Amino acid sequence: MTNPELLTAADVRLMQGLAQRVTAVRPDLVNSDASFGELAWNWGRGHAAVGASWRRRLWFSGGELVAWGWAHLPRRVELSDGSVKDVTSTYLAYQVHPDHAGLVDEVIDWYDTTAAGLERSVLPGASDGFALRRWTEHGYVTDPASLGDTGDWTQLNVRDLADVEQPVLPAGYRFRTADEAGPEAAVRAHLDAWAPSAYTVEAYQGVRETDGYRGDLHLLVEAPDGSMAASAVMWLDEANRTVEFEPVGTHPDHRRLGLGRAMLLHGMLLARAAGAAQATVACLGAPGHPGARGLYYSVGFREFTRDAPLVKAGTPG
């Protein structure tokens, strides 16, 4: 029998629809991990390996999804270097439509019940004053790990696509797509950029099956020796004419050559040709993490929103 609390592909499609509707009216209120592309990426790459540790609840009004919570419970993750990581805390991704803001209290109560006794974390948007007050009222406080110059809070960056410069790659490098290069090359490119990682060919197959994935918008940069030096997946939200880069990475041996910059510019031109008018990409925002932020700023992105990491301590026993 299936567990009705487990997150399904059909649920994710509904959640992506809510992301599109919130983006249309209040894009600053789309939470971390709740955007059209993030939902597809996180579900696709993880459900086969750790989906049994996911719990969800959906709230409807008039037959339409207006809020959801997705709890990531403690789990064991196998990484590409052969190591195993035990995740002992819980994390909640969630979204509430601004017309139903009061449902955040029900989301919090459900999360506290689902993860009772465990350390809990959540990432509401910093611009959502109402939600922040409700989380505080329920005992959540600023996560100490988010403070200081090396804090781990995330900012969302945005730029329009009206004027995009032409990309320039170093001699011998060329642009490819996942459709052209194939699954093994696409997975290897990700692992080389993000090692150690839990990404696998099976995880990539899950990504390919999500709503919104397009192999022609999954970019690769091929090195002169035929290996893949960089990669980026783009998620096109046709309803809002936006494109989201997630993830973006470069092999350590090919960094500081301008590959990331060229790949982003190339991707924005492709997205514009596909109908997008705006692009977004997320990165760590604290001063001590300048690398990705500097890259995105160099191609015209600027901060739009940021999250406000909160935690609630677990109880002993």
Image (spheres, rainbow, N blue to C red):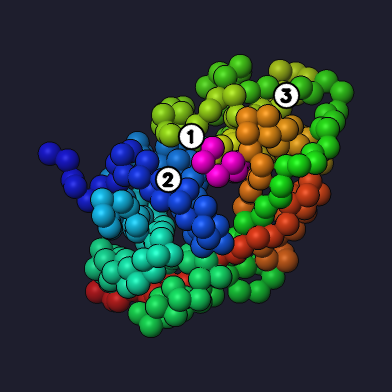
Asked if residue 242 is among those painted magenta in the image, a careful observer would answer yes
Q: Could you say whether the residue bearing mark 2 is in a helix, strand or loop?
A: helix
Question: Disc 1 designates what residue?
Answer: 212
Quadrant including the N terminus: top left
Q: At label 3, which amino acid type do we have? A: Phe
Task: Tell me where residue 171 sits by quadrant.
Answer: top right
Q: Earlier in the sequence, mark 3 or mark 1?
A: 3
Left or right of 83? Residue 295 is: right
Is residue 248 visible in the rendered image? The answer is: no
Task: Return the x and y of residue 67 as percentages of the image width and height.
Answer: 35, 59
Q: Earlier in the sequence, mark 3 or mark 2?
A: 2
Q: Could you say whether the residue bearing mark 1 is in a helix, strand or loop?
A: loop
Q: At label 1, which amino acid type do we have? A: Gly
**Magenta region: which residues?**
238-245
**Contact check, label 3 and label 1, Cβ < 8 Å:** no
Q: Residues within 10 Å of mark 2 (few under 14, many from 20)?
A: many
**Contact check, label 2 and label 1, Cβ < 8 Å:** yes
Q: At label 2, which amino acid type do we have? A: Gln
Left or right of 241? Residue 264 is: right
Residue sitting at 59 percent across and 24 percent down?
216
Residue closest to the eye, 96 or 167: 96
Question: Disc 3 designates what residue?
Answer: 175
Q: CA distance from mark 3 to mark 2?
A: 29 Å
Task: Return the x and y of residue 204 as percentages of the image width and height.
Answer: 47, 30
Q: CA distance from mark 2 to mark 1?
A: 9 Å
Task: Tell me where residue 103 sits by quadrant.
Answer: bottom left
Asked if residue 299 is among those painted magenta in the image, a careful observer would answer no
Q: CA distance from mark 3 to mark 1?
A: 21 Å
Task: Return the x and y of residue 62 as percentages of the image width and height.
Answer: 26, 54
Work out whether 134 lies above or below 110.
below
